């Protein structure tokens, strides 16, 4: 099955609103001739509405990096799915390893966040990945299987029709170290089979499974050539529009 490549930039806690607008505007201009690749950027929540306005009517889509699963109320400092959606986001990253590592996000919280996102029509990008210690202990699949099955527990085929799965080995994020081609290939193949066994062959065939972890203009072509890799989630190299466009246009 042909899946449209999905290349997303996670800007993390970088850029003021004005800086985000400048980069997004520049990127949208550079992406004006992109047809077959879906491009998404995820600025900080505070910049969502500004960036939404800046990229309106362009080929670049908007995503958020995080939300809280409650609908509203006394949760100081948090934003709800509704707010993220109203600010103009179409996608939402859930379970990024930095959220898991620094903010104690559990698979249960991830599951509730996805439920909240689906409730308002946001498309979830579920991020999963093993740490170096887990890989060394040969627990990679055990960890990934748990992150996927617990994260997606209770959802139906229809609800997951827009799911994107992002495999991001924790040891490759922001380290300059990318997973080997065979490692990525094996994990992505495994994840597609897992989706088939948990849900259906059709869902597994349709779901885009993207790779993240030090993707750069220099290595993107090799990564995108791997079977079952349907795109990339890019951190550091997405902050600069000129650099990011060289990843997006990996095919020349
Ligand atoms: C990420 O944060 O999702 C990521 C992959 O970061 P980097 O590209 O900087 O490794």
Image: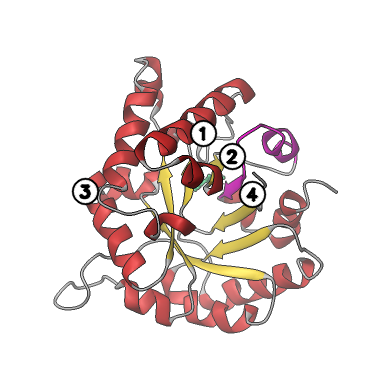
Within 10 angstroms of label 4, few (less than 14), some, or many (20 or more) residues?
A: some
The residue closer to the viewer here, 14 or 112, is: 112
Q: CA distance from mark 4 to mark 1?
A: 25 Å
* Residue 108, numbered label: 3
Please tell me whether mark 4 or mark 1 is closer to you in this view: 4
Residue 98: percent from the left, percent from the top? 38, 47
Specify whether 155 is left or right of 241.
Answer: left
The local crowd at label 1, few if under 14, some if 14 to 19, many if 20 or more residues have their Cα within 10 Å, is: some
- 158 vs 174: above or below: below
Q: Is residue 163 above or below residue 1?
A: below
Proximity of marks 1 and 3: CB atoms separated by less than 8 Å: no
* Vertical relation: 122 (above or below) 230: below
Q: Is residue 129 visible?
A: no
User: Residue 3 bears which disc, if any?
Assistant: 4
Q: Which residues are magenta?
A: 218-234
Query: In terms of sequence position, does the residue under pointer 2 or pointer 4 come before the other?
Result: 4
Marks 2, 4: nearer the viewer = 4
């Amino acid at each position: 099955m042909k899946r449209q490549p999905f290349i997303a930039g996670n800007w993390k806690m970088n850029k003021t609103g004005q800086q985000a607008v400048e980069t997004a505007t520049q990127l949208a201009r550079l992406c004006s001739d992109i047809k077959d690749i879906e491009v998404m950027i995820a600025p900080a929540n505070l910049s969502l509405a500004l960036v939404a306005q800046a990229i309106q009517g362009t080929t670049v889509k908007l995503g958020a990096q995080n939300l809280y699963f409650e609908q509203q109320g006394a949760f100081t400092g948090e934003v709800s799915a509704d707010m993220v959606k109203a600010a103009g986001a179409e996608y939402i990253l859930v379970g990024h390893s930095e959220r898991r590592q620094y903010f104690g996000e559990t698979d249960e919280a991830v599951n509730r966040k996805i439920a909240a996102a689906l409730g308002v029509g946001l498309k979830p990008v579920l991020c999963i990945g093993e740490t170096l210690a887990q890989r060394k202990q040969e627990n990679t699949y055990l960890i990934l299987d748990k992150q996927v099955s617990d994260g997606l527990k209770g959802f139906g085929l229809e609800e997951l029709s827009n799911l994107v799965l992002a495999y991001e080995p924790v040891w490759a994020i922001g380290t300059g170290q990318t997973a080997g081609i065979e490692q990525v290939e094996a994990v992505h193949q495994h994840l597609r089979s897992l989706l088939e066994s948990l849900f259906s062959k059709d869902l597994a065939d349709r779901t885009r499974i993207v790779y993240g972890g030090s993707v750069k203009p220099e290595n993107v072509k090799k990564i995108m050539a791997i079977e079952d890799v349907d795109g990339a989630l890019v951190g550091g190299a997405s902050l600069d529009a000129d650099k990011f466009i060289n990843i997006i246009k990996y095919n020349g």
